Image (tube, grey):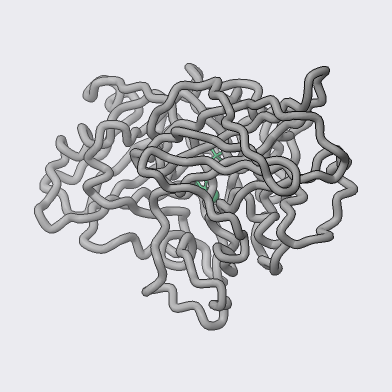
Amino acid sequence: MVVPVNKNSDFIFHQETPPNGGPPLARLIEKFATPVQNFFLRTHGDIPEVNRSTFRLTIAGLVKRPCEFTLAELGERFPAKAIVATLQCAGNRRSSASAIKPVPNEVRWGNEAISNAGWKGCSLTDVLQFAGVDDQAKHVEFVGADRCSKEGTEVYFGGSIPLDRALQRDVLLAWEMNDRPLATEHGAPLRAIVPGYIGARSVKWLKEINLLIEPSKNLYHAHAYRLFPSDTSSASADWEHALELGELSVNSCICAIEEVPNGVLVKGYATAGGNRHVVRVDIGFGEPLKWREASFQDPPGPGIWRRWEVLIPKLLVGEIICARAWDSAANTQPEDPESVWNFKGYMNNAWHRVRFGMPWEDVKVAKPEIDYYL
Ligand SMILES: Nc1nc2c(c(=O)[nH]1)N[C@H]1C(S)=C(S)[C@@H](COP(=O)(O)O)O[C@H]1N2
Ligand SMILES: [Mo]
């Protein structure tokens, strides 16, 4: 593997080629803005080395003025914009979905396919305005410079978002992450950042933007990141008519459990999708479940996670602890993971459940509803 140089020694790789992994969960929630060495990494092909000085971003498709920009031109021509945004993979928490029924051929993410960072670049909408969007255009496609093999063909990774979303100022063409130039593995020199959307739309190594009538035909848009009913298999999947993933759903995870003198301190993160924000996290414990409301370490806001913590009473070994979040549109997480199971293992946002005091590596999938991957 081309070893990503920026990763911490405790970073856990699920797969080495191409590299995919994330930090241990307790480390994941150490900081509001995840340092690059702990930031989860999701790649579908080999990491490309893009030369900064010869780099050009092209804007094409349904625009009045097709154009290209160097990095310096993007910086000079458009006002700089900085945001904080959480990236979360649609496959986050897949391992607990696959404990119900296998999800073959996909990265077995635990709860670590998520991280939060500061991003700086320019707003996509300013660049689109410069190019002049045609009236028929309804979708904005991003294409990366990485070649990925999928279904027997090699394609550049890509995908699209609706034009309405692309015109909002928080969708960035970013060249900085946490006040440093983007790291190679996180998309240098330029990537898209689409807050509140599945991570796949925040295309790295961005080289092309196309204005389209229909959503992208790229295999990573048309034949991936769609949500199927539980009884659909890869053989019966009708990709064209399946729900195209975009906005994330409300989610939360337990990331650390510490025994303290007066009880048990439980910590984790919660997220909301679209322009919604996390308003409440409930932690359930024992049997029958009792609930406590967690307090937040981070402010509320669309597109950013909120880390939380709560003190619960002492528990016996093996007792359940679970988490469920609520967002600003009163959505909450489903109790039952089977109801959201799908053969791609996307968007698992069932209550996160663990058993107190069990060494994580020893917890077998005794009962399938238990999320044994802490
Ligand atoms: N060009 C390109 N962009 C990409 C990907 C990729 O494989 N190639 N993976 C996507 C997916 S699925 C996710 S979840 C995020 C992960 O971003 P990160 O690796 O910076 O954490 O990048 C997205 N952008
Ligand atoms: Mo992803």
Q: Residue at x 47, y 54 (%)?
A: 157
In terms of depth relative to the viewer, which is nearer, 230 or 20?
Answer: 230
Quadrant of the image containing the N terminus: top right
The quarter of the picture where residue 115 lies is top right
Q: Residue furthest bottom?
A: 236
Quadrant of the image containing the C terminus: top right
Q: Residue at x 35, y 26 (%)?
A: 121
- When the figure is inspected, residue 227 is found, relative to residue 262, above or below; the finding is below
Residue 262 rendering spot, x and y as whole percentages: 79, 19
Q: Residue at x 56, y 77 (%)?
A: 231
- The answer to whether residue 63 shows anywhere in this view is yes
Q: Is residue 145 left or right of residue 105?
A: left
- The answer to whether residue 45 shows anywhere in this view is no
Residue 159 rendering spot, x and y as whole percentages: 39, 54
Q: Residue at x 50, y 38 (%)?
A: 271
Q: Is residue 69 left or right of residue 189?
A: left
Residue 156 rendering spot, x and y as whole percentages: 46, 55
In terms of depth relative to the viewer, which is nearer, 231 or 322?
Answer: 322
Count how many numbered circles sit on residues in the image.
0
- When the figure is inspected, residue 44 is found, relative to residue 319, above or below; the finding is below
Q: Is residue 163 left or right of residue 347?
A: left
Q: Is residue 247 left or right of residue 19?
A: left
In terms of depth relative to the viewer, which is nearer, 44 or 253?
Answer: 253
